[in-house]
Image (cartoon, grey):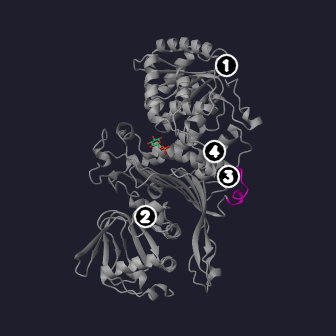
Amino acid sequence: MPDPTQVLRSPAVETGDNPPSQPCVLLIFGASGDLTKRLLVPALYNLACDGLLSDNFAVLGTAMDAWTSEEFRARMTADIQKFHTRNQFDPVVWDKLVARFSYVAGSFTEMATFETLKVEVKRLDAEVGAGGNVLFYCAIAPRFFGTVCDHLAECGFKEGAGWKRIIVEKPFGTDLRSALELNKDVLAQWDESQIYRVDHYLGKETVQNLLAFRFANGMFEPLWNKNYIDNIQFNVSEAVDVEGRGGYYDSSGVLRDMMQNHMFQMLAYLCMEVPGSFEPDAIRNEKAKLLQSVRHFTPEEVAAHTVRGQYGPSGDKPGYRHEKDVAPTSKTETYAAARLYVDNWRWEGVPIYLRSGKALWKRGTEIVVEFKKAPEVIFRGTPITSLNANRLVFHIQPYQGIEIQFQAKVPGPRMQLQPVHMKFGYGEAFKASRYTGYEVMIYSCTYGDATLFSRGDLVEAAWRIAQPILDTWAASPVDFPNYTRSTWGPKAAAEMIAADGRRWFEVVTPDVLQQSPLFKGGDPVFLEQVIMALKPKQVAAGEVLITKGEIGRELYLIEQGEVEVLDEHDVVKRVLNDGDVFGEVGVLMSQPRNATVRARVQTDLYVLDKTDFSRILRDNPDFAKAIRAIAKDRYDLDVHPDALLAPH
Ligand code: BG6
């Protein structure tokens, strides 16, 4: 039965303003849990602060904990201090909001609880004038979703005036089979139009903006296909480890926890066809179609197109297998990389790379669209030997912005190029306050706008992509751990993309560079020049980076790790680590390398090649001086300043 009162468009469509949410009673299952205090209540508070919460609104919390309504209010009042996201806390708004909170203790499996809830909802509805509208929020383990939906229906919650809608949290199933069953359970009593499956990434402004960017701007759509785009990368790096959630995580892993949901949602937004309108189902149809076009891998293809990883210890921090509630022989992946293909007219043959992991070097979510390179041939006879690809980078978080990378002519008499970029930052363009992402979910659900929620067919399509990977991984042996905490992840992921002649795009910010003494305090133009020229490289323990006697054209900067400099008798002369540079002699002078350099541990580096290096040296005399000082100190080598300026 379709939701009869579903309103697809809010009055804001006509006025351009944001009216308050629709009246309703919000019944939260799992009200004593983490999600409620960390995200749902702060989101309600944000809506209230911005005048976006209806006055005809009440919250009814329920969970097993034997709290009273007073206790619930007191706890939420203490927690909001920790979890609100505003610059300043407004006690007047909060007091008014929390006065509308009540609580009922009980088990989700007992009908008696639902009878009590029904009485309470009725009372609150009459008290605040919610018109019979009820929004059920399942902030509970997925195994209870079906039971809660059944009991709600059996108890008569579907009847009466007003709309009834159910929000369910992720994970929606743990594999294809369980997702199909869950869809069946949830839809046994309720209509698809009443079910709102949350993926909190869709609540992020930067993710929603993918649609605005693609469909409100005419500039890129003609280029948005296999003729102009070389490859697309989705990167979701987390610096945090499993943070005490080992019990949950060990039965999940990153493919289920991040890729199958959050990353596939972003993939769908970025690659879907143009919808006929902005109606929720017009968008959701295109998203589902896109995911249905992603290739399902055979076991051989899984081996060729995916990499999994698990973090090992670093310093006094444990490896994944020694985290609380994790099996000591766990095969669960904390890192995954994949090369997917969308087998449709638009994207045929364009590799779509995805990677995500825990305990990586830094937090950052980016989408990189790399365009096909311009032909280099017209620059023959000039000092230009290679061209970089144009890139469009969507910075989702923590930095929020969009960047376009291209080449510009370096000022001067000769034709020389430098990679440069144009950037749009949310912080500079908008004054909006920081939201949790849940505000828009709750708000749009009260209007029956399902745009930001996953329809059953999309969830199933996403599991159909993930399932063969999960099955093949479960059936094949793995050598874990295979990456060290705080690194860029397993080297095999770098090798997978390198085999295609490409590399992962690492976002380097001036503060990353400034960790190196060589760049500390560098002026912004200099740092930008270096950042745009750096290329990431990963090496395993024992791997040789530079061999004495060979001619080299690269300077290396260690992002993290440790390398040893060896003399001709293999004696360690020096150990270099985070922030150090090496290889300067080879790029300063056209002479053979005068030492061998080998990685002692898994090491992540940036490479600066000679052409870029010379250009930067010419522009930055202080940098040139510092590099010459290093060469003098290490190898007693006097490099004449003119040598730096010599043409290459
Ligand atoms: C959740 C995952 O869905 O998303 C977590 O369960 C992960 O493991 C989190 O840390 C990441 O969300 P965000 O918004 O911090 O990128």
Dot 3 and dot 4 residues touching (CB under 8 Å): no
Nearest to viewer (mark 1 / mark 2): 2
Q: What residue sits right under mark 1 in the picture?
A: 162
Q: Position of residue 148 (x, y in %)?
A: 50, 22
Stretch of the chain drawn in magenta? 213-223
Residue 96 located within the stretch drawn in magenta:
no
Residue to which mark 2 is pinned: 514
Residue found 44% across the figure and 35% down from its top: 82
The spot of residue 264 in percent (x, y) is 55, 47
Label 3 vs 4, first from the N-terminus: 3
Which-is-in-front pick, marks 4 and 1? 1
* Amino acid identity at mark 1: Gly
Closer to the eye: label 4 or 2: 2
- Residue 554, percent from left and from top: 43, 76
In the rendering, which numbered label is found on residue 214? 3
Q: How crowded is mark 4: few (under 14 residues within 10 Å), some or many (20 or more)?
A: many
Dot 3 or dot 2: first in sequence order is: 3
Check mark 3 vs ligand 1: CB closer than 8 Å? yes or no. Answer: no
Q: Residue 287 carries which label?
A: 4
**Could you tell me residue 83's position as x and y percent?**
46, 35
Residue 287, relative to residue 177: is it above or below? below
Query: Looking at the picture, which amino acid does disc 2 mark?
Result: Gln
> Are the residues at dot 4 and dot 2 in contact (C-beta closer than 8 Å)?
no
User: Taking 595 as reference, is 106 above or below it?
Assistant: above
State whether residue 563 is above or below residue 30: below
Real-space Cα separation, disc 1 to disc 2, in angstroms = 58 Å
- Looking at the image, can residue 387 be seen? no
> What type is the residue that disc 3 sits on?
Arg
- Neighbourhood count class around disc 1 (C-alpha, 10 Å): few under 14, some 14–19, many 20 upward: some
Which badge, 1 or 2, is on the more N-terminal residue? 1
Q: Nearer the viewer, residue 323 or 523?
A: 523
* SS category of the residue bearing label 4: helix
